[in-house]
Image: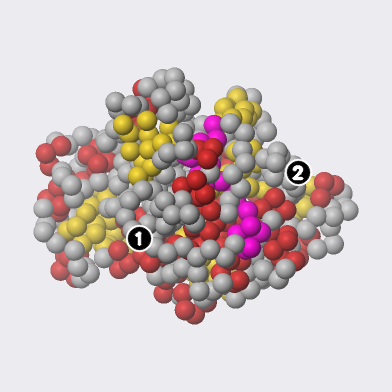
Amino acid sequence: MVSAAVAVPCCAFGEKTSPDLLAVGAQNVDVIVQYRTDPGERHHRKVTDRGGRFRRGLDLIRGAAYTIPGSEVAALAEDPEVEHISIDHPLTSAGVDYMRETVGAISAQQSGWTGKGIGIAVIDSGIFNMGDLSNNVYSQAFVSGGAANVDNYGHGTHVAGIIGGQGVWSASGFYHFGGIAPAATLISLAALDGNGQGTDSTVIAAINAAIQLKSQYNIRVINLSLGRPVYESYKVDPLCQAVEKAWKAGIVVVVAAGNEGRNNSANTEGYATITAPGNDPYVITVGAMKTMGTSTRGDDLVASYSSKGPTLFDHVVKPDLVAPGNQIVSVAVANFATLEANYATNYAPYSDYCSYSGNSPYYFVLSGTSMATGVVSGAAALLLQQTPSLTPDQVKARLMKTASKSFPSSSVATDPVTHATYTSYYDIFTIGAGYLDVWAALNNTDVAQGSAESPTVTYNPSKRTVSLVLSGSNIVWGTNIVWGTNIVWGTNVLVSGSNIVWGTNIVWGTSSMSGFGIVWGTNVVWGTTAANSSETTTILVKGEK
């Protein structure tokens, strides 16, 4: 990782290097190098000859992870066999019960759709094998100190419970804390450590393992409840390239949008804060909703911390849809995991949920787009159990088309700790195609043809409008009667019945144009400190009112 930042001349770098490498001086830096061909010993030797060290092969993206002096990066980039060089970025977890009722999962399960036979790879901090998660059939660690069947952080276990928890420890209680797909097969690939930290390369290695294990465990879904800031276009970002490989291998990849919706450090009112790899147009990127403590959908509101689009650099429309993510009860790693140890008050009290007194050692409350991502991964498994022939694009398109599109124009949330208030607007960059509806998706028989890549938007400076870019005969989001823009995203996010999604009288939720200019700039990143801020941690654990 980069320690001190010392600027180097811009002319030393070009299109083959990530823009954030400009801030690296002579000190060592962890990088990912993508090559034009599969790298071998001669490629590694060119790095070691420059004082570097080989750390991990990344065959999935024809790359490798190295530690190299920052002063040697420019010279390495001149090698004609090098495709692109990026920093190996640090990465973190993105971090009721009416979750299942709200999205229609109870009806689905009562009809026999439980995810049986579908493998879901949970790339996170691991899964602690206990009664609720006995369907975890394989575990592998990609971080230092990681071990099979262990979750020293607690995040991966919680997410796994949302996806496929069997609710064993709450079977006799008033509420049953099961997951969306309780009969699915869980595959634990630990890419985050006991502090919820990992790197691009650990996640890429885990994605590669999921692809290799696909046939053995029928892995049809990968859950990535994690992320980090966007530093470059998804077209060269190694993490994005890895998720695309999984998608093209026939695996639905579901990714957290991020918890930076309150981040106004760049005067964008939280817009353009989608984290990577949620910025990739292939994957299903998920934002968070609040169930408001009821089983009905009508009073639900978006969580103010849920990251908003469009994505930096590429202006991809994200998130793709939203799902319950606030104050979600799921499986706990009793007593010894970092999250549980630091936030003991988050254990679910039996007095609220069961017929006992005291706090449960088995269930824990967390909030964030991480939790919402698990809900959508479970939903994808139900669709694939029902119709195994569906491709990732067809799963994505059906979930987006059938998502509920009934929302208020705006809502106000209050942080329970700081008491600050935040206003959210229900536009395409906040709620995407709408609110996950599992039952509606299972009752839909439309099969999309072509790519379901999320579209981009373009800004017309003379008219001050932002419009969807829909082109190409192989794109699902066309103008035909089944997959037209009005059906996919709903009329509430379009202007005057056209592809315009942002008019002249609304600019990113405020009247200020400064943030708007930053979103559409080509060299501005919304800040690297925000992803690890204490505010994010508070949101992840405490949720909001």
Residue at numbered disc 2: 294
Q: Nearer the viewer, residue 87 or 520?
A: 520
Label 2 vs label 1, nearer the camera: 1
Q: What is the span of residues highlighted in magenta in the rendered image? A: 425-443
User: Can you say whether 528 is above or below 94 in the image?
Assistant: above
In this rendering, position of residue 498 left or right of residue 412: left
What amino acid is labelled 2 in the image? Thr
In this rendering, position of residue 20 left or right of residue 14: right
**Outermost residue to the bottom:** 216
Percent x, y for residue 231?
32, 43
Question: Marks 2/1: CA distance?
Answer: 41 Å
What amino acid is labelled 1 in the image? Asn
Identify the secondary structure beneath mark 2: loop
Percent x, y for residue 172?
85, 62
User: Which residue is drawn at the image coordinates 48% and 54% (left, top)?
Assistant: 481
Residue at numbered disc 1: 474
Percent x, y for residue 264?
45, 28
Q: Quadrant of the C terminus?
A: top right
Q: Earlier in the sequence, mark 2 or mark 1?
A: 2
